[in-house]
Image: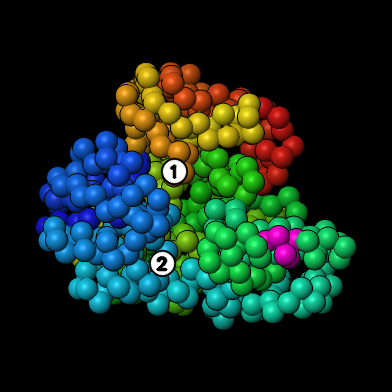
Amino acid sequence: MFNKILIANRGEIAVRIIRACREMGIQTVAVFSEIDRDALHTQIADEAICIGSAKAADSYLNMSRLLSACIVTGAEAIHPGFGFLSENAKFAEMCADCNIVFIGPDSNIIDMMGNKSNARAQMIAAGVPVVPGSKQILSSVEEAKALAVEVGYPVMIKASAGGGGKGMRIAHTEATIDEAFSTAKMEAKAAFGDDSMYMEKYIEEPRHIEFQIMGDKYGNIVHLGERECSIQRRNQKVLEEAPSAAIDDELRAKMGAMAVKGAKHVGYENAGTMEFLLDKHKNFYFIEMNTRIQVEHPVTEMVTGLDLIKEQIRVAYGEKLSVTQEDVKINGHAIECRINAENTAMNFMPSPGTIEEINLPGGLGVRNDIGVYRGYTIPPTYDSMIGKLIVHAETREEAIKRMRRALGEFIVQGVHTTIDFQYAILGDEDFISGKFDTSFLTKKSF
């Protein structure tokens, strides 16, 4: 097994990876920007090394500095977490060139599946159902208009290199497609440095369902069930569940088989997520693949009992998967609430500052994946998520009650958070009944 791993990330995911490594007897190297010098991940790792200024481009996105830190500290592998360089094919390739193991798929797979247009083409070739739309990059708004007539309005204009809800616009009529196309294109260029666009038929009232898959170097691929990710604000996930209240065993087996089929078609290795839209008639369509570990991976861990970070590390080292498809059992129900330092009364404006007091909830079936502590100053430089609260129970009803109880115990003073917002969602009748889709938060006011 690896002796030492460098974590090319920060915050709660860096803490999560360090904990898994420690349990495996693997030494860890934390990297940090100057503004993150006192961050929790730097304090619990075996080593910590500064890689630049607060600006992400000078630190967490600086490939040469990350690789230099890896070489200097003698780390044999890099775990990228999520965000930053986790889906950067060039970085994965540079790791390989330096004989450093990138804990994730290889650069060719990231390049193939990280680009949504390419991924769509691969799934069509694999026989996985996809949302009707463009088969290749759109060259102009005129081409977009012609295709929209063919697939029918409304349509979704999407960035090929997109993620996190950026570079996406809906056009309901031809009169709105010019603005949707140009706005999405500009946003994609600013966010990803790539303004190539494609189009999909906009599925109305869908649920966002994703399947966790894991593959090894020997062609073995399994799915670990689905996650319900329909509670979204501005195309960004807020709360996730496993399993989905909309999916029965038969549909789970069918969708899971398609997720595995698509992953096998491209020879996928390590952790990945196949994302689908499920319409009200139970038809499902592939929309994209995330070639990394997901923010919401803990709910899958809670219902399967499998540590996905440890599995990633073992697979990257060359071991076979520890489970077969027959071994995977879904037990009980798990819910995750993302806790962000945001002021919900001010349109979710980020709320950086010093945490004066914090009380983390506990008790049976409660898990905290947190990257902060009392006295820690949340910087204004990075994503506003400070942690995740996860609960597990025998039933969905019990899990909802447990999460509301846990959120009621979660106290953070000094900054605004989304704790009360999450509490309100968990008390909504439509949420409790499981009758919702991706438009849930646009129709509610909490």
* Image: magenta residue range: 180-184
Residue 318 drawn above or below residue 440: below
Direction from residue 275 to residue 439 in the image, left or right: right
Q: Name the element at disc 2.
A: loop
Question: Looking at the image, which residue is at 65% across and 56% down?
Answer: 278
User: On the image, numbered disc 1 is attached to which residue?
Assistant: 381
Direction from residue 6 to residue 350 in the image, left or right: right
Between 222 and 319, the one lying in front of the other is 319
Q: Pointer 1: residues within 10 angstroms few (<14), some, or many (20+)?
A: few
Direction from residue 312 to residue 200 in the image, left or right: right
Direction from residue 277 to residue 35 in the image, left or right: left
Q: Quadrant of the C terminus?
A: top right
Label disc, if present, on residue 88 of the rendered structure: 2
Quick check: can you spot residue 2? no
Quick check: can you spot residue 416? yes
Residue type at numbered disc 2: Asn
Q: Position of residue 331 (x, y in %)?
A: 41, 42
Magenta part mainly helix, strand or loop? Answer: helix
Label disc, if present, on residue 45 of the rendered structure: none
* Mark 1 to mark 2 CA distance (whole Å): 21 Å
Question: Looking at the image, which residue is at 57% across and 60% down?
Answer: 190
Q: Quadrant of the N terminus?
A: bottom left
Q: Position of residue 59 (x, y in %)?
A: 33, 54
